[in-house]
Image: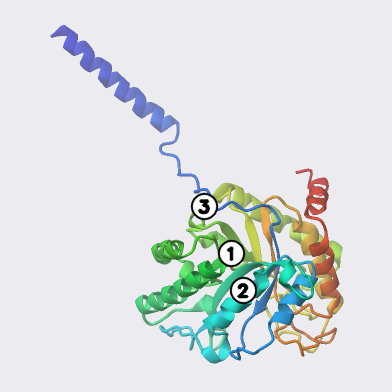
Amino acid sequence: MTRDKFLILAVFAILIGSAVAFRLLGGPRPEPAAEPKLAVRPGEYRGISLQLNNGDDNHPYEPLIDEIGATGANTVCLVIHAFQENASSARIFVDRRRGPSDERLEALIRYARSPKSERPNARPALKVVLMPIVLLTNPRENEWRGTIAPSDWDVWWRDYADYITRYAKLAQETGVEVFVIGSELVSTEKHEHAARWRDLIAKVRAAYSGRLSYSANWDHYRKVEWWDQIDIVGMTTYYDLTGGDPPTVERLLAAWEPIREDILKWRAETCPSHPILFTEVGWPNQATCAQYPWDYYRARNRPAPQAQAACFEAFFRTWAGHPAVAGFLVWEWRGDPSWQGGAEDPSYIPWNKPAQKVIEKYYRARPSADSDARTARDGS
């Protein structure tokens, strides 16, 4: 009997000690973010986006893909579209008049990825990022895809899942390297939709074996709760960098410094194994580009090609070669070979502007040289 009492007291002491230790150590620790399923090398993607918004299957996209390759880019991001009427609409649809057929899209992906020996202009084969996005056909004031609030979320999510999984299957069949499951859908990033996103990601994983990303808005990437389920953290770059002051390279570099540190600190604390892909790197050719880069209507009558070029220069100096960065997708390339652009064109398109030379300088640089320069600047 005495022996049993000692055993009971010993067990009791162990339980009390464990409880005290548990409390002193702060209780259960949060689970670390899951490792990305498919590892990505730093600087792996040097890309430019091409919107496929012409439903004519004879539209000459191939020369535009070749132009992108000629810049030194090793990646083309093909952007395709689905539509809903306005922010409260529940139904999503693909308009065959405003984009390529599946057969045409497959042909373009294969063209971009085909070996160098098969190309008459001998440019390298390109990696392909496929980015399906949602546009509004009849938006009301200040509506865009980040503000959608459909009358029936169940219907909207059903349509969206059908849209995304359809192109995930096509991405699998054509060997797409990165598939983007959504872009800037800010209102869907609330906590109550997290389970829907995880369910969608599981469906996409069942159809597609490549790398997955999501393109978060520059001011909303912290709200996404399911970065651990995908491979690459995607984010846009539309920060106010000047507050209205002249956008000199020095001023822009100074503005990027705290932004960079904030992004890297968040990544280290949240998903340190997940690289960052800047999914929309762009500034319109307008005098207000550094302050309002997201607003391409603000100063269309005031082109500022040197300001646009300065924004690209400061961005690449800040981020090129950083070990946390998987790469960049410049927004965007011209969609028609007859479109000439130039210094007076106010759009994002860098074609035939000083910004193109900046992009080519960094895209043609050896990645190792970029990395060495980045290490020398930061001591990291």
Would you call the spot at circle 2 few (<14 residues within 10 Å), some (14-19), or many (20 or more)?
Answer: many
Element assignment for label 3: loop
Q: Is residue 247 left or right of residue 54?
A: right
Q: How is the image coloured?
A: rainbow
Tell me if I can see residue 252 in this picture. no
Q: Position of residue 98 (x, y in %)?
A: 57, 89
Q: CA distance from mark 2 to mark 3?
A: 23 Å
Q: CA distance from mark 1 to mark 2?
A: 12 Å
Q: Tell me which corner region of the image, top left, top right, bottom left or bottom right, holds residue 118.
A: bottom right
* The disc label shown at residue 37, or none: 3
Q: Position of residue 112 (x, y in %)?
A: 67, 72
The amino acid type of the residue labelled 1 equals Val
Q: Quadrant of the N terminus?
A: top left
Instruction: Please name the residue that numbered disc 1 is placed on.
Output: 178
* The disc label shown at residue 202, or none: none
Is the residue under label 3 in contact with that under label 2 (CB below 8 Å)? no
- As drawn, the residue found furthest toward the front would be 117
Question: Between tags 2 and 3, which lies in front?
Answer: 2
Question: What residue is rendered at 42% in x and 81% in y?
Answer: 150
